[in-house]
C-alpha cells in the first residue's frame, strides 16, 4: 500500500527533489542546499556515486568506473578546484599513443618516434577536416581507410595504428565506424589545450563523498513515476510518494532510454526524440591483482591482437596502490559482447593477451574485478557517445532543456562539449542549479511553475 506523501509534506518553502546521486545530481543538490534551498536526493542504488565507483574489496582503492580527472588545464574544470580544496594528491597521466609501450602480435616491442605519432595525428585530423566538407557523413573508419588506400599511413606499423585507433575509440566509447568526423574534429580542438589527465590517490569517490556531506539522500529509492500535471509534482519511489515544486533528473541516459521512469504527462516529443537518439556508449574494464609485478615500470602498454579491442590496452596501477595491479579497457561492440560472457571466459581471454607480451610463464592473478556497466541496474551503460548522421548539438541542447520550468535535466549526456567527462557531468549539475536559483529566488513568494517557455537562458 502506498504510504502518504513523505517528503516535505509539512514544511513550508520551495521543495526540490533530485533524482540520482551521481556526481551531477550531487553537484546540483550541494549547490542548491548551500544556497539555502531544501533538497532531497533519491538514489535507486544502495550507494552514491553513479559511474564513479571506487572498489575497496581487495583492501585498496580500485576504480570500476571513472578513472581520471580529464583535461586538467581546461578552464572551469571544477574537479581540479575540488582536488585543491580537499588537498588530494594525484598522478599525472598522458594518455597519448606515444606514451604506450607497444607489443606486436609476436610479442616484440615496436618503437615509433613522437614525430611519427604527430604525423599520424596530423594526417588523420586533416583528412577528417576535409571529409567534413566533402562528405559530412564520413566516419573515423572512412578516414583511416582513405589514408591507408593512399599510402599515407604506410610508414606506421599496424600495431601503432591499432593503438592510435583504440585510444580514440575508448574516448568515444564506440567503434571507428560509428564515430563521425565532426566528433573527431571537435575532440582534436578540445584536447589541443586540455592538458593532461590525473588519477586520484585514495579513490575517485572522495569527490562524491565530499559533495554528499550533509545532504538528505535516500538510498534504495528507485523512482518509477513522476506526475507533473499539477503545480505540485508527485514523485513515486518504492512505496513512498514525494511532493516537490521542482525535480531535477540526473539519472543516466540508459535509464531514460529504457523508460524506467514514467512521466505523466509524457515528456514532449522533442525531449523523447533526444533521449532516444543520443548514442549510448560502452566501456568496461578487467582488473587483475598478481602475486608480483612481471611488467616492470611500464605504466601503459598496448598488445596487438587480431581484434584490436580484445584486451589490448593496459594500464598499471602499481604507482597508485603500491600493489601489482594492471587493468585493461575495452569499448564499443566488443565491450557489449563481453558483458554477456562469464568471468572465466573474460579472464582467459585477457590472460591470452598478456601472455603475448610477457610469455606463458606469467603467474595467474590472485584476484580480479570485472565491470559490466551495461548490466548495472539503474545505470545500463557507460557514457554517451558521439552520434553518426545526427545533430548532436541540437539533441543534447534539447535534452538539457527544462520541461515547464519544473522538470530539469542534468548529467554528462546533457553536456554539449564535455559529455563523457566527469567534470562535464559536474558542470551540468551546477548549470541546472543556476537555472533553478534564477527562476525560483528564495526571496520571491510566487514562482513560474507553469512558465510558457520550456527553457531558460542563463547568462
Image (cartoon, rainbow, N blue to C red):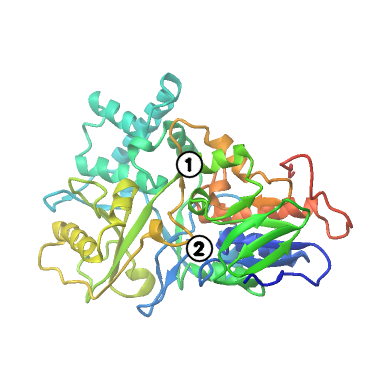
Q: Can residue 151 be seen in this view?
A: no
Within-10-Å neighbours for mark 2: few <14, some 14–19, many 20+: many
**In the foreground, 313 or 215:** 215
Mark positioned earlier in the residue sequence (2 or 1): 2
Q: Which label belongs to residue 192?
A: 1
The quarter of the displayed image where residue 247 is located: bottom right
Residue 215 spot, x, y in % from top left? 66, 72
- The residue furthest front is 1
Q: Does residue 456 sit above or below 1 in this rendering? A: above
* Residue at x 36% of width, y 34% of height: 140
Which image quadrant is residue 150 in?
Answer: top left
Q: Position of residue 345 (x, y in %)?
A: 20, 61
Q: At numbered mark 1, what does the secondary structure look like: helix, strand or loop?
A: loop
Residue 424 has which mark? none
Image marks 2 and 1: residues in contact by CB distance under 8 Å: no
Question: Tag on residue 50?
Answer: 2
Amino acid at each position: 500500500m502506498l504510504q502518504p506523501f513523505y517528503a516535505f509534506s509539512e514544511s513550508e518553502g520551495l521543495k526540490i527533489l533530485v533524482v540520482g546521486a551521481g556526481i551531477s545530481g550531487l553537484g546540483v543538490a550541494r549547490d542548491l542546499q548551500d544556497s539555502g534551498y531544501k533538497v532531497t536526493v533519491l538514489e535507486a542504488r544502495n550507494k552514491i556515486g553513479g559511474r564513479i565507483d571506487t572498489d575497496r574489496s581487495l583492501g585498496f582503492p580500485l576504480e570500476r568506473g571513472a578513472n581520471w580527472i580529464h583535461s586538467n588545464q581546461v578552464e572551469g574544470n571544477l574537479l581540479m578546484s575540488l582536488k585543491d580544496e580537499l588537498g588530494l594528491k594525484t598522478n599525472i597521466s598522458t594518455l597519448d599513443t606515444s606514451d604506450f609501450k607497444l607489443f606486436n602480435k609476436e610479442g616484440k616491442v615496436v618503437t615509433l618516434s613522437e614525430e611519427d605519432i604527430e604525423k599520424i595525428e596530423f594526417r588523420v585530423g586533416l583528412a577528417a577536416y576535409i571529409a567534413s566538407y566533402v562528405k559530412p557523413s564520413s566516419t573515423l573508419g572512412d578516414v583511416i581507410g582513405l589514408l591507408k588506400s593512399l599510402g599515407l599511413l604506410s610508414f606506421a606499423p599496424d600495431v601503432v595504428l591499432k593503438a592510435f585507433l583504440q585510444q580514440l575509440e575508448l574516448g568515444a566509447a564506440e567503434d571507428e565506424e560509428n564515430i563521425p568526423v565532426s566528433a573527431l574534429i571537435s575532440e582534436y580542438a578540445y584536447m589541443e589545450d586540455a592538458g593532461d589527465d590525473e588519477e586520484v590517490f585514495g579513490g575517485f569517490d572522495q569527490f562524491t563523498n565530499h559533495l554528499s556531506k550533509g545532504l538528505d539522500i535516500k538510498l534504495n529509492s528507485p523512482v518509477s513515476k513522476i506526475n507533473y500535471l499539477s503545480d505540485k509534482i508527485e514523485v513515486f519511489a518504492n512505496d513512498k510518494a514525494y511532493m516537490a515544486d521542482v525535480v531535477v533528473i540526473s539519472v543516466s541516459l540508459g535509464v531514460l532510454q529504457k523508460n524506467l521512469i514514467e512521466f505523466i504527462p509524457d515528456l514532449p516529443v522533442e525531449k523523447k526524440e533526444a533521449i532516444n537518439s543520443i548514442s549510448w556508449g560502452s566501456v568496461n574494464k578487467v582488473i587483475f591483482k598478481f602475486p608480483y609485478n612481471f611488467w616492470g615500470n611500464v605504466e601503459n602498454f598496448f598488445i596487438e591482437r587480431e581484434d584490436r579491442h580484445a584486451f589490448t590496452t593496459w594500464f598499471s596501477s602499481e604507482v597508485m596502490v603500491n600493489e601489482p595491479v594492471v587493468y585493461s579497457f575495452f569499448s564499443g561492440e566488443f565491450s557489449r559482447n563481453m558483458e554477456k560472457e562469464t568471468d572465466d571466459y573474460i579472464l582467459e581471454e585477457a590472460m591470452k593477451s598478456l601472455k603475448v607480451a610477457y610469455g606463458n610463464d606469467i603467474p595467474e592473478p590472485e584476484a580480479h574485478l570485472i565491470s559490466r556497466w551495461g548490466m548495472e541496474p539503474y545505470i545500463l551503460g557507460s557514457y554517451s557517445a558521439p552520434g553518426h548522421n545526427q545533430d548532436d548539438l541540437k539533441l543534447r541542447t534539447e535534452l538539457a532543456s527544462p520541461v515547464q520550468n519544473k522538470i530539469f535535466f542534468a548529467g554528462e549526456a546533457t553536456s554539449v562539449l564535455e559529455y563523457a567527462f566527469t567534470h562535464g557531468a559536474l558542470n551540468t549539475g551546477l548549470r541546472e542549479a543556476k537555472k533553478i536559483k534564477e527562476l525560483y529566488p528564495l526571496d520571491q513568494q510566487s514562482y513560474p511553475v507553469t512558465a510558457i517557455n520550456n527553457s531558460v537562458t542563463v547568462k
